Image (cartoon, rainbow, N blue to C red):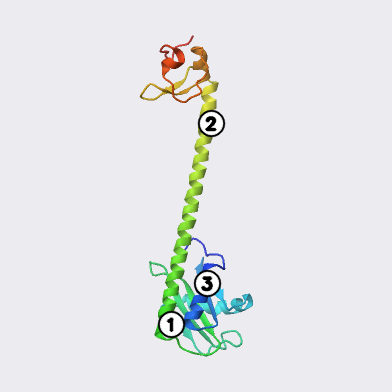
Amino acid sequence: MMNAAPRPGGTLDELANLAAQVSVAPAAIVVLEERLSWIPAGQTGCSPEFIETVLPVISRVAVSIHDWIELRDAQTQLPDGWRWLSCLPIRLPSGAVAGVIAVLDRSPRRLNSGQRAGLQTVARQVMVHLELRRQATDLATTTEQHRQTETRLRDNEAYFQSLVESLPQNIFRKDLNGRFTFVNGAFCRTVKRQKPTHRSHRLRSVSGRVVSPLRRG
């Protein structure tokens, strides 16, 4: 699914809270599939102990979920005092299930059509949030790769400069307009001039005459 499950908290907690409000339920959990495991990524109205107890039930439901699944009078499956669980799938654009939104209550009940529509909207918002996180991660990776490439390029240029400076041959580089873009120390010694401080000088401005890079003295 996504590259990695988001850390608990933040936006997904807020979306879990919205799911609870839409369904008029005291508790809601956003659970995401990650490497064949189901990870709680956002919650409201739940303690860590409660989530640990109810997660296996949600996981069993999530594995076989197609549209909606509701467990009514499920006090034998849920923690003490809880009797109702409803799960809605969070789907990728491909249709694959990326996770579920689970809402829980202490009394058995049914969701009405308006509540279901509201939860579907919340599920879409979860998917949008996950996609944005994925894009941000990809961008950060690309930016880091670009930074590493620039570092390697600078290192390579520094190595090249050091190499040509150490050679006894006259080495220079000019652009199409006859301006120097690089001269090495041997060349400057040959024409008896100091190395230019600017990147672009005409050849005659350095030596006063045309000097072949293959000629010494």
Q: Which of marks 1 and 3 is nearer the N terminus?
A: 3
Specify few, some or many for label 3: CA neighbours under 10 Å numbering under 14, 14-19, or 20 or more. Answer: some
Residue 14 is labelled as 3
User: What x and y, as percent, mark residue 19?
Assistant: 49, 77
Query: How far apart are labels 1 and 2 at the CA level?
Result: 64 Å
Q: In this view, does 112 lie to the left or right of 76?
A: left
Residue 146: image x %, image y %?
A: 48, 45
In the image, residue 200 above or below residue 51: above
**Dot 1 alpha-carbon crowd within 10 angstroms: few under 14, some 14 to 19, many 20 or more:** some
Snapshot quadrant of residue 172: top left
Q: What is the secondary structure assignment of the residue under circle 3?
A: helix
Amino acid beneath label 1: Gln
Label 2 residue SS = helix
Residue 187 in sight in this render: yes
Measuring 47% from the left and 80% from the top, which residue is drawn there? 22
- Type of amino acid at the residue the image marks with label 2: Ala
* Label whose residue precedes the other's in the sequence (1 or 2): 1
Spatial CA span between label 1 and label 3: 17 Å
Dot 2 and dot 3 residues touching (CB under 8 Å): no
* Circle 2 residues within 10 Å: few <14, some 14–19, many ≥20: few
Which residue has dot 2 on it?
158
Q: Which amino acid does label 3 sit on?
A: Glu
Q: Can residue 38 be seen in this view?
A: no
Q: Residue at x 41, y 19 (%)?
A: 202
153 over 67 or under it: above or below: above
Which residue lies under the disc numbered 1? 115
